[in-house]
Image: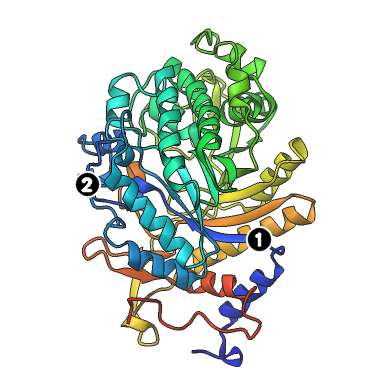
Amino acid sequence: MTTTDQTTPQQNEARAAGRNLPEGFVLGSATASYQVEGAAHEDGRGPSIWDTFSGTPGKTWNGDTGDVACDHYHRLEEDLDLMAWLGLDAYRFSIAWPRIQPTGRGPANERGLDFYDRLVDGLLARGIRPVATLYHWDLPQALEDGGGWPLRETALAFADYAAIVGRRLGDRVGMWTTLNEPWCSAYLGYASGAHAPGRTEPAAALAAVHHLNLAHGLGLQALRDVVTGDPDYSATLNLHVIRPEGETGAEAVRQTDGLANRVFLQPMIEGGYPADVIADTSGLTDWSFVRDGDDVVIRQPIDVLGVNYYSTQRVRLWDGVSERQQADGHKDVGHSPWPGADRVEFLPQPGPYTDMGWNIDPGGLEELLVRLHRSYPELPLMVTENGAAFPDEVVEDADRAGGRAVHDDDRIAYVRDHLAACNRAVEQGVDLRGYFVWSLMDNFEWGYGYSKRFGIVRVDYDTLERIPKDSAFWFAELTRARTDSAGGSAEHPPPNNP
């Protein structure tokens, strides 16, 4: 084991960053079920919309699917040991609805619940807090066949599913998250078609917005009815940081901020929908899918708001003459994910960029956290996803266990700078409870298949071997900085990587 006086500048930097974090600040990592689990046809799991979508030619890069993914389902113990080596305070995972209810309705599939039992118990045995997300986009295909999120029945089915999971795991999960990024589920799934189920129906997307919000409220009610522990309850939103350009920028921001942010924040925290969003979209829908009393159901108290952040956007109104720019950071498949904002154009942003083409701007995270704190000063926040894809390269390295390494300095800089932004937000009074790096390991990146690598642990998709990158060693130093006063090093070999 490396001693204190033999540490590298990078290790010392990580330790300093860790010591600067607020007391009790949670450091974790995150994944999602379809992206990592694999075992798509095993132990009673039913098909999800992502099984169908990724199995449709032309929908994902290289025709990649999540059938095997990282094989986390079969390599659970190995991955849990990696999390323990990293020193994670918490692990944010999602539960695959079709693994629990193969058709989205009916009795529980016990073999599916057994897997999450093992996961939760394995985390607790290693001193890691389980953070469970009920929905990270893998809707059972049978529910989509019946209409999907544009229908109220899907929200009602979600409440039944939440009760099943809460009843089984509710004595041990430390934090429950109802939905991950409902913006993506609604707009990328039903307006642009870039995500499953691949529909391009703007009115349906707006109905999906409401029924996802309703599912959040119903899901929280269901959990609170059955959970026997004392967890925190939350939702996770990918709130957009949108900046104006030129004379028309302010109006463009108003429109997109309404669709991206306020249409979720207002019903969940304040109640009701923004009047300007309803007016902007009146040519698409009359919002009659909103029923009396829905606002009360949706506005359930939460203990923390999850914030996912990666990049910023720059907007103005299109002049109708020049070539319209659509650099909003989302996969362009020919249809807009912004229903009712037809005149808004998204301008390219200055670099540097990640491998996704997203601009790197840690100041945007600080800006977002401060804005949320000023709007909702009593609501604690948590960064539940932040990370970057880069074109990592495996190199021979005799000094590294296993003789191979990934020297991802760009990812280390990304995480370091965004943690610094978190610290600046805390200094401005933000009640920020934690930070989860995305992602624990390389995985299936939705429409981009396996072409983009976000992990701090590399996955060899041919052998499924896990190779901790330099960023993993850096993150392990970060977590140890607050608990190891002797300055012990994470440079010792990770588990199962001799």
The residue that appears at 41% across and 69% down in the rendered structure is 82
Task: Please identify the quarter of the rendering in which residue 403 is found.
Answer: bottom left
| Residue type beneath disc 2 | Asp
Task: Please identify the quarter of the rendering in which residue 98 is found.
Answer: top left
Q: Looking at the image, which is closer to me, 75 or 387?
A: 75
Question: Mark 2–mark 1 contact, CB under 8 Å?
Answer: no
As helix, strand or loop, the secondary structure at mark 2 comes to loop
| Residue type beneath disc 1 | Phe
Q: Where is residue 20 in the image (x, y as percent from the top left)?
A: 71, 68
The residue that appears at 50% across and 38% down in the rendered structure is 226
Compare marks 2 and 1 and give the one earlier in the sequence. Answer: 1
Checking the image for residue 353, the label placed there is none
Q: Dot 2 corresponds to which residue?
A: 43
Q: Does any portion of residue 364 appear in the rendered image?
A: no
Q: Position of residue 470 (x, y in %)?
A: 46, 73
Q: Does any portion of residue 1 appear in the rendered image?
A: yes
Nearest to viewer (mark 2 / mark 1): 2
Task: Please identify the quarter of the rendering in which residue 99 is found.
Answer: top left
Q: Dot 1 corresponds to which residue?
A: 25
Left or right, 104 with respect to 347, comes to left
Furthest residue in direction right, as rendered:
428
As helix, strand or loop, the secondary structure at mark 1 comes to loop
